[in-house]
Image: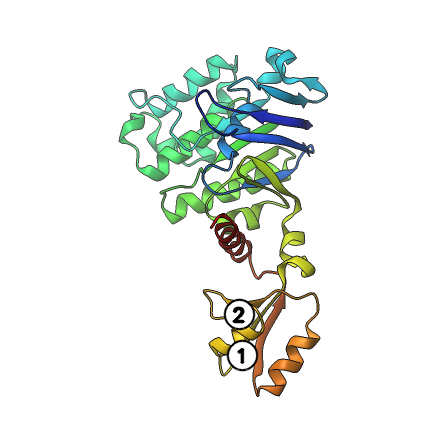
Amino acid sequence: MIEIKNLSHQYPNAQVPALRGVSLEIGEGETLGLLGPNGAGKTTLMSLLAGLQPGQSGQITFDGVPFARLSKKQRHQISLVPQDFAFYPLLSVWDNLKFFAALYDVKDKAHLQQLLEETGLEAHRNKLAKHLSGGLKRRLNFAVGLINRPRLIFLDEITVGIDPESRRFILESVAELGRRGVTVIYTSHYLQEIELLCKNLVLLNHGRMIYQGGVQDILQQNGRSGLSVQTQPPLSDEHVAVLNGKREANGAVRIETQTAEPVWVFLQEKGYAVTACQFGFASLESFYLDFLRNQAEVTC
């Protein structure tokens, strides 16, 4: 569906590029997580892919057509739900839906009614958007993004600051989009959401693409992610240093090794009992925290 070749972008007066030679392919019906620290280039990449600003270098194609040459109909197959609320606070819920429907030439009022019901906004249809709770505003933002029945949708931090019920509703709705074959590009600082929803992941750092592949693959890459162990008694600082390990937040010690046998031998010789162990990472969050820690050490 989307092919990106050597995409670079630098803002005026910026000392370094926001994106540096990013190339990747996003398939039809894929749910892709976009991950990276602040300033990594995620927002820039999403805005370029959504057509909100022109690219400077490289190429983006949608169904084989360069983005700049997309027809109005093709552009209307793409939607973006931003972190900031993208509706009019002084319009009612229903009037907001009708307004954005007119922009997309959507005349199907039954579709808008269905969106109201599916997002739990029917009881609030005549309420001004500014009077909605934070969770209901997120639902309205999400509903607006679905008006054009998109084939491709960008979801940028759409669960920030909402109640658990609305968060669960939005996550279930995103999963349903994937089941219906909609291509979803998803960013979130809640890494459990990416792990739950996304089969594949792109990791950006300093404008470069560091990783593209399966979420489970990155958790299970033995040679690079090492071994996490928990012992009884807990490993002493001296033995952590001997193993060149690092303590994790959950009490485990991560050891960079491609094979467990030397570690087991050492632990047995020192009288430790292994209570838990895992090659790879227990969660995307543990991988990401380890990645950020390593990046900080490189920077220092």
Instruction: List x then y, in percent, for residue 72.
Output: 59, 11
Q: Identify residue type, mark 2.
A: Val
The image's mark for residue 231 is 1
Instruction: List x then y, in percent, for residue 31.
Output: 61, 39
Tell me what residue is drawn at x 63 percent, y 81 percent: 266
The image's mark for residue 181 is none
Farthest left residue?
131
Tell me what residue is drawn at x 30 percent, y 37 percent: 133
Quarter of the figure with the N terminus: top right
Q: Nearer the viewer, residue 17 or 89?
A: 17
Residue 285 left/right relative to 263:
left
Q: Which residue is mark 2?
A: 253
Residue 137 left/right relative to 78:
left
Asked whether disc 2 touches disc 1, contact meaning CB atoms under 8 Å apart, the reply is yes
Farthest front residue?
300
Q: Is residue 66 above or below residue 203?
A: above
